[in-house]
Amino acid sequence: MTSASFSRIMCAKHEELQNDKNMGREQKRLLFSREEIDNAVIALSKKINSDYRGRNVLLVGILKGCFVFLADLIRHLDIEVTVDFVILRSYGSATVSSGEIEVIKDLHESIEGKDVLIIEDILDTGLTLSHFKEHLLLRDPRSLKVCALLDKKARRKVDFEADYVGLTIEDGFIVGYGIDCDERYRNLPDIWVLTGEGSEA
Ligand code: IMP
Ligand code: MG
């Protein structure tokens, strides 16, 4: 089993366990508290404020996972910003991504000549962001950078690094702070890792 399919299966397995009313045990572990997340977001905002001082930045959020992160980040930015969102879908099965992406909801306006900063929740294999970045580069932005709240460095399948990273994590399926498992848990204020039989040492 690839580690990508392992993560997805953890999510499915968790749901199965949740539906079983006899299972009362905890299946997630706190990874980052609200305070740790706040500190990471503030550190990111300081770098972004300094790097883009005097410029107007278009933040491009990748929905849905970015929405809480972007909402917090933007309130620490004291540069001129505008915001737009995209919805992407990866081709392939639920467990194995082919790496190709489809743009379900595209940007509202042209990015030609603009400073664009992509805002993503998790950088995992790197397939989504490397394809999306190539896709946006065809539209001739003035600059194009990536900011990811979480980076699972060990899981990379392509050579891709974000320009700004909030927190680096090991493998494991993450939920909370806008990030979901099958659309659930986005409302948790902290960041959790799903655990379950055999998922974690
Ligand atoms: P990548 O193309 O493998 O880098 O996939 C990145 C996307 O997969 C992220 O934007 C998330 O939507 C999703 N993803 C990756 N890891 C997790 C996770 O641990 N929890 C929830 N979603 C994840
Ligand atoms: Mg995402």
Image (cartoon, helix red, strand yellow):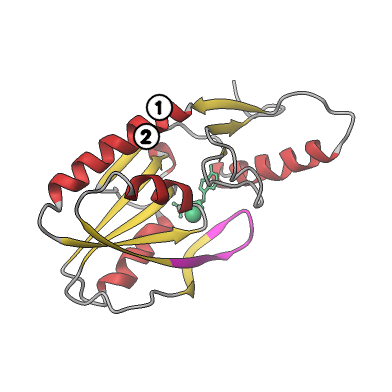
Q: Position of residue 188 (x, y in %)?
A: 59, 38
Q: Mark 1 sits on what residue?
A: 36
Q: Residues within 10 Å of mark 1 (few under 14, many from 20)?
A: some
Is 197 situated above or below 97? above
Residue found 30% across the figure and 68% down from its top = 134
User: What's the magenta region?
Assistant: 86-97
Which of label 1 and label 2 is nearer to you? 1
Residue found 38% across the figure and 33% down from its top = 38
Instruction: Give the overall secondary structure of the magenta segment.
Output: strand
Q: Position of residue 60 (x, y in %)?
A: 35, 62
Residue 75 as seen in the image, left or right of residue 144 = right
Disc assigned to residue 167: 2
Q: Is residue 110 magenta?
A: no
Q: Position of residue 195 (x, y in %)?
A: 65, 29
Q: Dividing the image into 4 quarters, which one contains the C terminus? A: top right
Is 187 situated above or below 29? below
Residue 12 as seen in the image, left or right of residue 20 = left
Residue found 30% across the figure and 71% down from its top = 136
Q: Give the residue type that dot 2 points to.
A: Leu
Residues 94 and 182: in front is 182
Q: Residues within 10 Å of mark 2 (few under 14, many from 20)?
A: some
Q: Report which quarter residue 14 is drawn in.
A: top right
Figure disc tally: 2
Residue 5 as seen in the image, left or right of residue 53 = right
Q: Dividing the image into 4 quarters, which one contains the N terminus? A: top right
**The residue positioned farthest toward the right in the image shown:** 22
Disc assigned to residue 19: none
Residues 125 and 50: in front is 50
Q: Position of residue 133 (x, y in %)?
A: 31, 64
Q: Give the residue type that dot 1 points to.
A: Glu
Badge 1 vs badge 2, beta-carbon distance below 8 Å = yes
